[in-house]
Image (cartoon, helix red, strand yellow):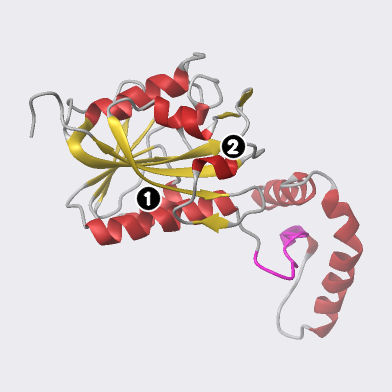
Amino acid sequence: MLKVRLLIINWVRSLLAPRPFIGIFYLPRYIKHYFQYRHLSSTEKVVAVDTYPCLLDATVSTPFDSHYFYQGAWLARFLSRQQPSLHIDVGSSVMMVSVLSGHVKTIFVDYRPLQVDLANLSSVGANITCLPFQDNSILSLSSQHVIEHIGLGRYGDPIDPEGSVKAAKELERVLKPGGKLYLSLPVGEQRVCFNAHRVHSPGSVIDMFSHMKLLEFSYVNDNGKFVQNGNLVDVERSAYACGMYVFEKCPSVGEV
């Protein structure tokens, strides 16, 4: 019974994800290869109930999500240079966080707690608009491709049109003066793509962090090209670029 259930799941996924029904066009090749393999195999038993079609993987180059690929590489290189004793990440890719924790002690915060057991990595369940950290307490902080989702209900969070701004203010609150925030999010022509995400204009992101100074801006453009140390104006008219900001929190009044 379990095998039949897995068979149905595998076939439905192959035909509906990631591009619905495109896989149908590759079924003739799959069927040809299936019977060819059965004919050539003298030691392995190949039965239909164990089939697991992967119809869209025969590509000429390795596909990847340019936003997530480059933002993870970008952050990892900064942390490699900075060598913080502790890094806090809020809501970023768990695959990236698992790798980061290999060389820096990491606390991962997410609205949906990450339930794993891995050395150097701990997880905390919390809302990014109400983080469980004291004011001015974190020296190394990241949140990648996260704040654009807040308040749109996508992940079960409350509806709030000010979600991105509130998340930004909370990240700013917990960061220690002199501390670094590594932030990424979609940038370009500002709009709300309900209930997936917002796209912020590059300059409006800086406006959300009134007690921060921008140290570096890099981006991935609409063509998937990564540009280190770019200019905000380069992506102002983008449809869906990825802006990567390194902010440093300014000292409070009276602090040196």
Q: Residue at x 26, y 61 (%)?
A: 81
For label 1, the crowd category at 10 Å Cα-Cα, with few meaning under 14, some 14 to 19 and many 20 or more, is many
Q: Residue at x 20, y 48 (%)?
A: 86
Question: Which sits in the foreground, 50 or 220?
Answer: 220
Residue 149, how many percent across, how many down?
A: 52, 28
Please, what is the dominant secondary structure of the magenta stretch? loop
For label 2, the crowd category at 10 Å Cα-Cα, with few meaning under 14, some 14 to 19 and many 20 or more, is some
Q: Mark 2 or mark 1, which is nearer the start of the sequence?
A: 1
Question: Which sits in the foreground, 125 or 218?
Answer: 218
Disc on res. 197: none
The residue under label 2 is: 236
Q: Quadrant of the C terminus?
A: top left
Q: Toward which corner of the image does residue 51 lie, by quadrant?
A: bottom right
The residue under label 1 is: 97
Q: Toward which corner of the image does residue 181 lie, by quadrant?
A: top left
Mark nearest the camera among 1 and 2 is 2
In the image, the segment drawn in magenta is 49-62
Please indicate whether residue 16 sits to the left or right of residue 29 in the image: left
Please indicate whether residue 252 sits to the left or right of residue 72 in the image: left
SS for callout 2: loop
Residue type at mark 2?
Glu
Residue type at mark 1?
Val
Q: Toward which corner of the image does residue 44 lie, by quadrant?
A: bottom right
User: How many numbered marks are there?
Assistant: 2
